[in-house]
Amino acid sequence: MNPFYNPVFLGKILKRYLIDIDRLDRISEESLRRYQDRQLRRLVRFADTVPLYHEKFKSAGIHPTDITGIADLEKLPYVTKDDIKRHYPDGIVSSRIKKDSLIEVSTSGTSGKILSLYVDMLDIVMGLFAYMRTLHEYELSVWKNKISIIGDFATHTAESGYVTRGLQPRFHLPYLSKNIQWLNTNDDPKNVASALNDFQPDFIGGYVGMIGHLALLKETGLGNDISPQYIATTGTVIDPFLKAFIEKKFHAKVFEVYGATESGLIAFQCNQGSYHLMSDLVYAEFFRNGQPVTSGDAGEMIITKLYGNGTPFIRYNAINDIVAPFEKTCSCGKAGALIKKIYGRNDLALYLPDGNVMLPSSFSEISSKILYELKTNKVKNTKIIQHDLKTLEIQVVIDETLRTIGPSVEKIFQFIQRGFEEKVGPAVHVTVKEVDSVDTSQGPRIISMVDKSKYTISRYL
Ligand SMILES: [Zn+2]
């Protein structure tokens, strides 16, 4: 039976919705910790029915009853991307759950490495609730406001799994679907702009690149009627200049929502501007060179997802983001942990001769400046290749239909070159060259061939 027609299941979901959505606003730190402890105990017992975890626990000599709460988390082994891949498909789902009741989704593959995993309807509903929570923070609601979500609806992604294959076939909520517009970030930005213009949403959620394009299109007169109150960006870190440009073009406030396919939503920016972890849904640890980092210091994020009956993620070390935790409290009064800064993907880093590691947050502003300073989106694609410590090659694909419009290709190339030279310093030789296409299927758009095993990181930029 489809679980969504099961009244007990629906009741459970409804109850969860009412309890969960504003939990962080109401709960004390002590009750949150007790809740996390309870969720972790449930999670570990459940994971023990999943072959991958059963094996891991066994070889580490751990019995699920040894784990009484978050304080015991460090006893558990890490789980890697490779672990998940090796046990796919049957070894990453519980022997108690029918696999055909689950939905398979994959990571978007921006890093070139696609990972497949399973989610259940509870994951999907909780994922949407987490998103609704961010809307609630800004006094928006799917019941009274018009919401546009520009998702990655390529067939394999989490978004298409959640919405196209998960919710839409099971839910028939005409009122809700009237208020929510689903758009595809893989479509032509002009078509997206025109759909938004017709719908006139109060809120737009989308990837940084697409939102940046839309801001530029609006400047050229496309999408004059798009005037949301709020825009949430996701996918990559947004630099402050691009954020300001988008806010100005749309007369809207931009906030960030941060998540991953494996973990669901991880954090969001509250109306005071702080990054709050969704501490009732995920638990994060931060390490550098195997040691926990202190508040404000950048480290690799290890994530434990506290809910769901799909593929469990416990101490998963392959979100690959460098993030700085922040041991402070926010004036908004929400319970749970804070993040000081998200630096971006660890596997999309450039390694400089002086020991400084440049992460996406540090060079994303170069491409966003092309948008808001040169006012052009004719750079269709780029690939950054670091051949060695001192040689950086930037490959650029130009949109043929825009080649003769706006600033010249030469001017754009000089702009990119100068941008990188300022970032990497005089010791690194930067070349920019035009290519017909970049192959991202073989790997990420940022590749560093520097031997990381012989490299000592002094700090993250
Ligand atoms: Zn806050």
Image (cartoon, rainbow, N blue to C red):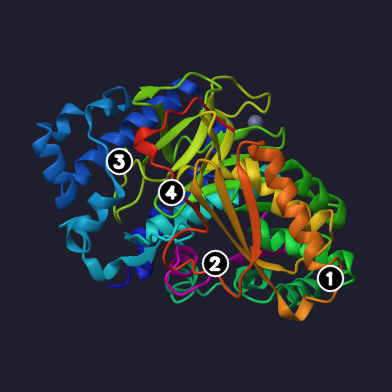
Who is closer to the viewer here, 315 or 237? Answer: 237
| Amino acid type, callout 3 | Ile
Q: How many marks do you count on the picture? A: 4
Q: Upstream in the sequence, badge 3 or badge 4?
A: 3
User: Which residue is denoted by mark 4 in the rendering?
Assistant: 449
At x 78% / y 67%, what residue is drawn? Answer: 409
Given contact means CB atoms under 8 Å apart, are the residues at marks 1 and 4 in contact?
Answer: no
User: Which residue is denoted by mark 2 in the rendering?
Assistant: 152
User: Where 174 sits versus 329, above or below?
Assistant: below
User: Which residue is denoted by mark 1 in the rendering?
Assistant: 223
Closer to us: mark 1 or mark 4? 4
Residue segment shown in magenta? 141-162
User: Where 439 sits versus 67, above or below?
Assistant: below
Who is closer to the viewer here, 120 or 453? Answer: 453
State the separation of the CA atoms marked 1 and 4.
Answer: 42 Å
| Amino acid type, callout 1 | Gly
Q: Position of residue 127 (x, y in %)?
A: 48, 54
At x 45% / y 52%, what residue is drawn? Answer: 126
Q: Quadrant of residue 111?
A: bottom left
How dense is the environment of label 4, judged by Cα within 10 Å: few (below 14), some, or many (20 and up)?
few
**Residue 314 image label:** 3
At x 71% / y 75%, what residue is drawn? Answer: 399
Horizontal relation, residue 247 to residue 132: left or right? right
